[in-house]
Image (cartoon, grey):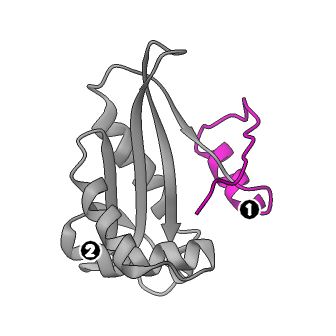
Amino acid sequence: MCILPTSNRIMSDIQIRKAMATDADVVYQFVCELEDMVFDRVLFNKYYEENISNNNYYYLIATDNEIPVGYLSCHGQLLLHHLNYVYEIQELFVSSEYRGKGIGKLLIAHLERQLVDKNYDMLEVASGFRRTESHAFYKAAGFTQSHYKFTKPGKR
C-alpha cells in the first residue's frame, strides 16, 4: 500500500493491484475517456479478457479506498532487433480529480517492480503529439525521447 497526500484529504490510501475480469467496466470507461471516443463494448470485452490472461502483459489498477482511480497496461514482446523482450506501456490513465498526485508514477513504479526479475532490454511508451502534459510526465518519470513513431492506418 502506498500513502499519498491529497489536496482534498489529509491522507489517501492508494493501492495498486493487478486488473481482473471484474474491472472491465471501469477500464472500458478509462480507455474511452483517454481516447475521447466510444469503443465497441463487445469487442472491447473480448480483447480485454484475452489481454489480461496473457503472461507477457501487465494490467494494473490504482484504487483509492477500493474505488478505481487509475489504470496502466503494458505489453511485452520478444523483438529480434533487441534479441530480448521490450515492454511498452500501451495505456496510462488517471481520473481527472486524481491527476498531479503521483498516481501515474506509482503505477509505473509498481510495473517496474513487477519487471525487476525479467530479462528485458527496455520499457517504452509512445504518446501522441497533442499530449504535451503526458510528455512532461514521462520525462519526469525517467523516460527519454529516443525514437520517432510512424503510423499508417490499417483496414477495418
Quadrant holding the N terminus = bottom left
Q: Residue at x 42, y 58 (%)?
A: 72
Q: Residue at x 45, y 79 (%)?
A: 40
Based on the picture, tell me whether residue 145 belongs to the magenta stretch: yes
Q: Position of residue 67 (x, y in %)?
A: 30, 82
Q: Residue at x 67, y 58 (%)?
A: 134
Based on the picture, tell me whether residue 133 belongs to the magenta stretch: yes
Quadrant holding the C terminus = bottom right
The label shown at residue 141 is none
Pointer 1: residues within 10 angstroms few (<14), some, or many (20+)?
few
Q: Residue at x 73, y 35 (%)?
A: 145
The label shown at residue 131 is 1
Residue type marked 2: Asp
Q: Position of residue 87 (x, y in %)?
A: 44, 35
Please say whether residue 24 is visible from this viewpoint: yes
Q: Nearer the viewer, residue 50 or 68?
A: 50
Query: Which quadrant of the figure has residue 59?
Result: bottom left
73 to the left or right of 91: left
Residue type marked 1: Arg
The label shown at residue 23 is 2
- Magenta stretch bounds: 128-156
* Total numbered badges shown on the rendered structure: 2
